[in-house]
Image: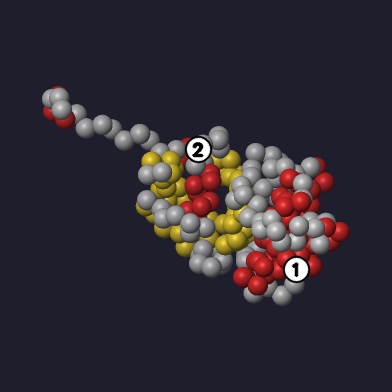
Amino acid sequence: MTLTVTDLSIARGGVPVLENLSFSLEPGKALILRGPNGIGKTTLLRTLAGLQPPLEGQIDGAEDRIAYASHSDGLKPTLTVVENLSFWAQVFGSHSIQPALDAFALTELSDRHAGNLSAGQKRRLGLARMLVTERPIWMLDEPTVSLDKNAVQMFADAVRAHLGQGGSALIATHIDLGLDGEVLDVGPYKAKPKPVDDLDGGFL
């Protein structure tokens, strides 16, 4: 099923940031979000993921189909790598965590507590959660932060495999992941300042 966004307007802290945004994301496709920092990419992803309501517009095809990875790795530091993935597997009803361990080279770290991992290892574990959700639409906000070159390649390979299985991905990133996907620059959709009422030329 295609994710379709029509005439979407969104706000951050009650202030409009993007408006009149429309696009579609088909199965097997990736869409890369681009735009300057603060433009509203994170707010857009959070809105599409159902974490906040839009101001206006319509989102079709998102119901219980989205897995969202934010800036935070979303890990429980007192649990091991395996325990963290097993927890999320139980939440989403998936059958195996081994593919996630393999995809992000985490098998050798299986028994290590998440709180004792390096920043890059934590990021790999946070991204591995996407695989155990078994949800078809991935939404990722700057997923390569703290990753070295090899780990970036692991992530790109995982996305390609996901797309090859009919999944889709919406990714906010400033780097080239080498994915065969379209780019959506949200800059042209920046919300325009609302005009201030003239107040008939009087004073308060």
Residue under the point 43% across and 44% down: 12
Residue at 41 percent across and 53 percent down: it is 54
Which residue is the site of mark 1? 97
User: In the orientation shown, which residue stands out farthest toward the front?
Assistant: 78
Quick one: SS at disc 2?
loop
Crowding at mark 2 (Cα within 10 Å: few <14, some 14-19, many 20+): some
Mark 1 touches mark 2? (CB < 8 Å): no
Residue at the image position 61 percent from the left and 47 percent from the top: 71
Rendering coords of residue 103 (x, y %): 79, 59
Q: Quadrant of the C terminus?
A: top left
Tell me: residue 40, above or below residue 49. above
- Residue 120 position (above or below residue 66): above
How far apart marks 1 and 2 lie (CA) works out to: 36 Å
Colouring of the image: secondary structure
- Furthest residue toward right: 108
Residue 171 location (% of width, % of height)? 62, 49
Between label 1 and label 2, give the one nearer the viewer: 1
